[in-house]
Image: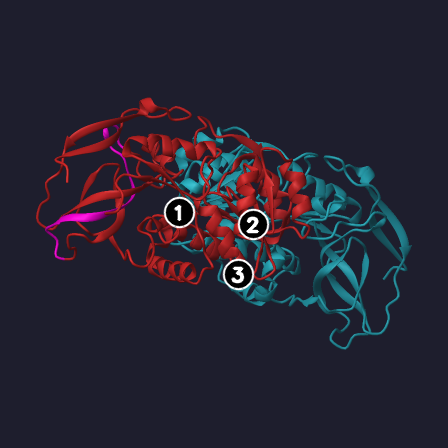
Chain colours: A cyan, B red
Amino acid sequence: MSNSNREFLLVSRPHGIPTDENFKLEINSRPVINDGEVLVETNYLSVDPYMRGRMSGVKTYTAPYELNKVLTGGVVGKIIESKNESFQVDDIVEGHLNWADYSVSNGKTLRKVDPDLAPISSALGVVGMTGLTAYFGLLDIGKPKEGETVVVSGAAGAVGTIVGQIAKIYGCRVVGIAGSNEKNKYLEDELGFEATINYKTENVKEALKEKCPDGVDIYFDNVGGDISDAVMSLLNFHARIAVCGIISEYNNIKPSTGPRIQRYLLNRSALMKAYIVRDYHERFDEGYEQLGEWVKEGKLTYRENIINGLENAPQAFLGLFHGKNIGKQLVCVRSES
Amino acid sequence: MSNSNREFLLVSRPHGIPTDENFKLEINSRPVINDGEVLVETNYLSVDPYMRGRMSGVKTYTAPYELNKVLTGGVVGKIIESKNESFQVDDIVEGHLNWADYSVSNGKTLRKVDPDLAPISSALGVVGMTGLTAYFGLLDIGKPKEGETVVVSGAAGAVGTIVGQIAKIYGCRVVGIAGSNEKNKYLEDELGFEATINYKTENVKEALKEKCPDGVDIYFDNVGGDISDAVMSLLNFHARIAVCGIISEYNNIKPSTGPRIQRYLLNRSALMKAYIVRDYHERFDEGYEQLGEWVKEGKLTYRENIINGLENAPQAFLGLFHGKNIGKQLVCVRSES
């Protein structure tokens, strides 16, 4: 255990694409815990596109990150000190903690992770917030039925890869849109997607027409922008659109413009519902249980893209906007020991 | 009873705003009925914005009108001949029939109207498709709760006036957007809307901010376009948008463009659902009953704008796109006798 604690602060708000200058790594003393608290040593840190929204000063569904304060996100780590009777030293936990070597928690929002069930990093991905995001968005908004066509954008990302696999568990035909042939090969060969589209090299609208001959029943949207525009004219009657993210838009200074979609929704009595995973917090246990079971049964596989070193967290985060990751992007701050 | 039958045909598809030349009034013989059929003499004919969609050749939620065939729409009329044991001569009925003096029906989709309960024209409006459209869109998609703010566009139209009144029955604060001070005076003074906005003379976005100090919980959209854009940044968390119509768009040759709305929905976990009243056909009886009761109790009032003469049906229809009507626009083909 070190006596110092590296912590990443947000020191300025990004205007457009974030840069190194928005972040600052500070070295402080390892924090001291009070009664009721625990000290968590970070193993893995999750970087997620939604964090870009919190870096802006705008109030959205989550409070913005405060300037000159430590950034926070999903963390898996080990309890190394405990003054809370619910936690013992060496417990592995997951929670919303600091971009730092050490975080203090009162334990209320920590979840214990069983390291014998699966690699502990999966508590940030497939059996963590990422998995829950895919699970509730697809099932509660999409309501997939056997034989339906599901289109997933950002298909090779952390959420997209899980959405596609759950859709397949439900007997759907899955078409993924991603940004490289390597990603699409993974989606088709390893995850069994029926078809894929490379949005960087193909005309998405034409490709969708060809690859969705029966139209689109569910569109799971991680990206927004013109890829989403292209899906609209292919919607089937009573189609459902789950708006999970708009990665193509987070770095825009002004909202982009495109064809207004009311017409397309109206022609098909379609539904578009945006959500954040927290909307479903009362059902998280159900989600964890089902996702864990599917992983155990081999129905849900996952891939992680791990960058080593807390000092590389901003780079890992920025990589999300350049399509660098297949599956879940993590930062390994300290290997499990 | 006349031996001739005037019938309006669609003879060309409008490109942009429809003109007289798209319609042709033909005089044919009064039709002869077969076993199982009835002959209906038209009293009132409903003209509705959605008909513009059917005049285009595009397949949407309803089949397009066929060229050189008689136009159809909501009709209230009297049975003047019957070879169907479910209907007697002099029964008043409502159904989807021809823009004509006389229509033949097999009775399957006709609904009997009790002329002693309310003026028979109301079977096309407040206790007809119009009322059902308001009822199901607001209640099933909007799910109004006491104290919430409901914004209605096209507020002085047939559907809008009913939506606002039902929202008030549910204890909501109602803000209407319409196109004249006369309309807004009616909405505030006679229907009790809390506030109104004249979109022709006011900056809608600024006016909405002022008139919705607690944000917007439900947006009932009849118009689309930039009025709807203006509502987006005021949505509250878990806001609901019912997309009922896009009257600002029906005459556009190409879909219009505007700020993409996924960002606004995502920031508020909001829902946008488009619908047609037929989606709720299994619950029509519930709707008719409740609407009739509210009318009887004086909780739901309505206004009709009646143009006389079948020959003026196209003008009545075109008037919808120029904001000429307050409440339900009807054509009186033959007064009740």
Q: Secondary structure at mark 3?
A: loop
Magenta stretch mostly in which secondary structure? strand
Using the numbered discs, state the Cα–Cα distance from disc 3 to disc 2 in whole angstroms: 19 Å
Pick the residue in front: B300 or A28. B300
Q: Secondary structure at mark 1?
A: loop
Q: Where A214 falls versus B129 (above or below)?
A: above
Magenta range is: B66-85
Mark 3 neighbour density, 10 Å: few (under 14) some (14–19) many (20 or more): some
Left or right for A84, reference A206 = right
**What residue is pinned by disc 2?**
B189
Using the numbered discs, state the Cα–Cα distance from disc 3 to disc 1 in whole angstroms: 22 Å
Left or right for A220, reference B118 = right
Q: Amino acid at mark 1?
A: Ile
Left or right for A283, reference A188 = right
**What residue is pinned by disc 1?**
B276
Question: Residue at coordinates 65% horizontally, 49% vertically from top-left?
Answer: B212
Mark 2 neighbour density, 10 Å: few (under 14) some (14–19) many (20 or more): few
| Quadrant of the rendering where the N terminus of chain A is positioned | bottom right
Pick the residue in front: A172 or B136. B136
The spot of residue B37 in percent (x, y) is: 13, 48
Question: Is label 1 or label 2 in front?
Answer: 2
Q: Residue furthest bottom?
A: A85
* Residue B170, disc: 3
Say which label, 3 or 2, has the lower sequence index.
3
